[in-house]
């Protein structure tokens, strides 16, 4: 039997359900709730809140966008994925994708046609950037306001179910990126229903979510219900939580711990493993430490320190937060410590930053060379391949795969996509559109960019430029880079030394001046030369598995390392075997 249509509106005097055919009054319940019998599937409706018609905060479909009516949906999808189990994160290769730019059609149905490519690449988990309904036709998804509803440009609720089913059929797990630290500025009506926001704290996006003030029990429940709904309704295998450092909560039980425990509690009910991954700017191991040891119990978090160390060393960039990085020592520190900053002074932040991971496994961190933020938050949305040589790209990729972290790729990275990933929006409010346009230009003016050189986020061309060109896969040099990435994925899958997460067993040698480094994990050794000069170095024992640009000389205990090149060896096998 369908659940009642129920809404929390503690300050309202009267709530009704308005459809084209009728006006239905609701019954008031204790605690500020109003409810009525469910609507048949396919009915468009508004909630009339003291005379004002608003979309349902728990709407599962907004076919006409954030300002249109909510539509009731059926729960009659026929699932056949009962036997699927997501692999553990220690064995994972995560692939972040944006539905709108992953294909030219920009839909979930079109994305299904490209899933076999991900299987062949060796991907285990597909991480979808936010799907909750946001203003306009296209955007990154971090301005969502209808958190239970799939964005209509991507497809209807059943289209997401078909996508998840298609992934599971191919052995791919699905993660959903959710945003609980703020709501978008257009179409956000939660404050009219109840005390969802507080002025006690401020975030980069305005008032914070009310997680610890009066009325916060119901607010917390709203977001936890949302997390569970993605998992139970759409069978997804986990969540990525956006910018959790902006979740301000002084409660005895932090919201993150409560949410994570509720998600993990679904494992027994559903009979499958689930995971929660956080994005944080704090280098705080409490996120992933066990609750019994004072942590929140989150399964893993993104490691921006590892990314920044790689990016700054490969590109030489020193602006903004990259000013804290740039040496090979920083790469070594990230590989051994997980974070580069574990309590040291950060010149960029002008204060001490971070805390040691202690004995926590590297499998609690995600390592990456690219992601949507680090590409899209550049003025022109350049990928790493736009900034450095192919040789340096391969070195960066190799370091990701031999690191003790869970590797993550961003769509198109594996073939060196020529398309950028720029910041794009489609705000329908002219004043908001102009404010976003102006803010984007002002932001990069401080970095020396001419305003005319910053792509207009409101132009459709900015969005279209960011869509992948899949024809590149069949052409050089993209085809060759793809083969390299596939080999790296195979290497990690076949060698347990690369999946154990042990940071204490990572051996790193480097020469800061000559710009070479050697990373050894068990039987695997990576030798990389980031400089433009040749270097003669001691050749690792064993068989050469992977190299770029060409195999080294083999008749000497020394190896002539070419400029901007990398070589991967496995010990215990005769060289050249």
Image: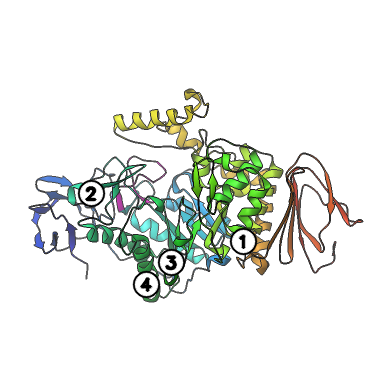
Distance between the alpha carbons at the discs numbered 3 and 2: 29 Å
Left or right of residue 455: residue 425: left
Asked if the residue under mark 3 is in contact with the one under mark 4, i.e. CB atoms within 8 Å, the reply is: no
The circle drawn on residue 265 is 4
Crowding near the residue tagged with mark 1, few <14, some 14–19, many ≥20 C-alpha atoms within 10 Å: many
Disc 2: which residue? 190
Disc 1: which residue? 404
Distance between the alpha carbons at the discs numbered 3 and 1: 20 Å
Residue at the spot x=37%, y=46% of the render?
153
Distance between the alpha carbons at the discs numbered 4 and 3: 12 Å
Left or right of residue 50: residue 496: right
Image coords of residue 123 (percent x, y): 57, 59
Disc 3: which residue? 297
Mark 2 falls on what kind of element?
helix
Residue 207's place in the image compared with 486, above or below, is above
Mark 3 falls on what kind of element?
loop
Residue 335's place in the image compared with 4, above or below, is above
**Sequence-first tag of 3 and 2:** 2
């Amino acid at each position: 039997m369908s659940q009642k249509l129920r809404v929390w509106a503690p300050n309202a005097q009267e709530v009704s359900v308005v459809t084209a055919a009728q006006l239905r009054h609701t019954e008031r319940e204790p605690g500020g709730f109003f409810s009525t019998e469910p609507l048949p599937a396919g009915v468009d409706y508004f909630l009339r809140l003291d005379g004002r018609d608003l979309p349902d905060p728990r709407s599962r479909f907004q076919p006409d966008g954030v300002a249109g009516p909510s539509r009731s949906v059926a729960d009659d999808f026929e699932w056949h994925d009962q036997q699927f189990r997501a692999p553990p994160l220690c064995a994972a290769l995560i692939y972040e994708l944006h539905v709108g730019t992953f294909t030219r059609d920009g839909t979930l149905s079109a994305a299904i046609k490209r899933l076999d490519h991900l299987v062949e690449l060796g991907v285990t988990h597909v991480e979808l950037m936010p799907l909750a309904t946001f203003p306009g036709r296209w955007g990154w998804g971090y301005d969502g306001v209808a958190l239970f509803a799939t964005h209509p440009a991507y497809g209807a609720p059943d289209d997401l179910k078909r996508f998840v089913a298609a992934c599971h059929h191919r052995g791919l797990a699905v993660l959903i990126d959710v945003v609980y630290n703020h709501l978008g500025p257009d179409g956000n009506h939660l404050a009219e229903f109840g005390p969802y926001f507080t002025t006690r704290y401020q975030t980069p996006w305005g008032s914070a979510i009310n997680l610890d003030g009066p009325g916060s029990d119901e607010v917390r429940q709203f977001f936890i219900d949302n997390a569970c709904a993605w998992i139970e309704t759409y069978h997804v295998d986990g969540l990525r939580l956006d910018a959790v450092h902006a979740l301000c909560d002084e409660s005895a039980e932090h919201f993150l711990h409560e949410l994570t425990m509720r998600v993990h509690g679904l494992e027994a009910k559903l009979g499958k493993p689930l995971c929660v991954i956080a994005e944080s700017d704090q280098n705080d191991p409490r996120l992933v430490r066990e609750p019994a040891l004072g942590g929140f119990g989150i399964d893993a978090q993104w490691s921006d320190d590892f990314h920044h160390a790689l990016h700054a060393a490969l590109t030489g960039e020193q602006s903004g937060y990259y000013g804290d990085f740039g040496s090979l020592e920083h790469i070594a520190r990230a590989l051994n410590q997980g974070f580069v900053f574990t309590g040291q002074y950060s010149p960029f932040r002008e204060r001490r930053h971070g805390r040691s991971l202690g004995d926590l496994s590297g499998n609690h961190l995600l390592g990456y060379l690219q992601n949507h933020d680090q590409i899209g938050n550049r003025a022109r949305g350049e990928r790493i391949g736009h900034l450095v040589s192919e040789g340096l790209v391969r070195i960066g990729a190799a370091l990701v795969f031999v690191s003790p972290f869970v590797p993550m790729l961003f769509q198109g990275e594996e073939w060196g996509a020529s398309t950028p990933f720029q910041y794009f929006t489609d705000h329908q409010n002219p004043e908001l559109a102009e404010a976003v346009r102006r803010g984007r230009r002002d932001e990069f003016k401080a970095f020396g960019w001419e305003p005319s050189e910053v792509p207009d986020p409101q132009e459709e061309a900015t969005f279209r430029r960011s869509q992948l060109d899949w024809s590149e896969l069949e052409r050089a040099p993209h085809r060759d880079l793809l083969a390299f990435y596939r080999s790296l994925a195979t290497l990690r899958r076949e060698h347990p030394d690369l999946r154990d997460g042990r940071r204490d067993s990572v051996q790193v040698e480097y020469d800061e001046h000559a710009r070479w480094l050697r990373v050894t994990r068990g039987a695997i050794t990576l030798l990389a030369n980031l400089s433009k000069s040749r270097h003669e170095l001691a050749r690792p024992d064993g068989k050469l598995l992977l190299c770029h640009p060409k195999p080294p000389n083999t008749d000497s205990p020394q190896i002539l390392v070419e400029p901007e090149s990398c070589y991967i060896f496995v010990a215990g096998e005769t060289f050249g075997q």
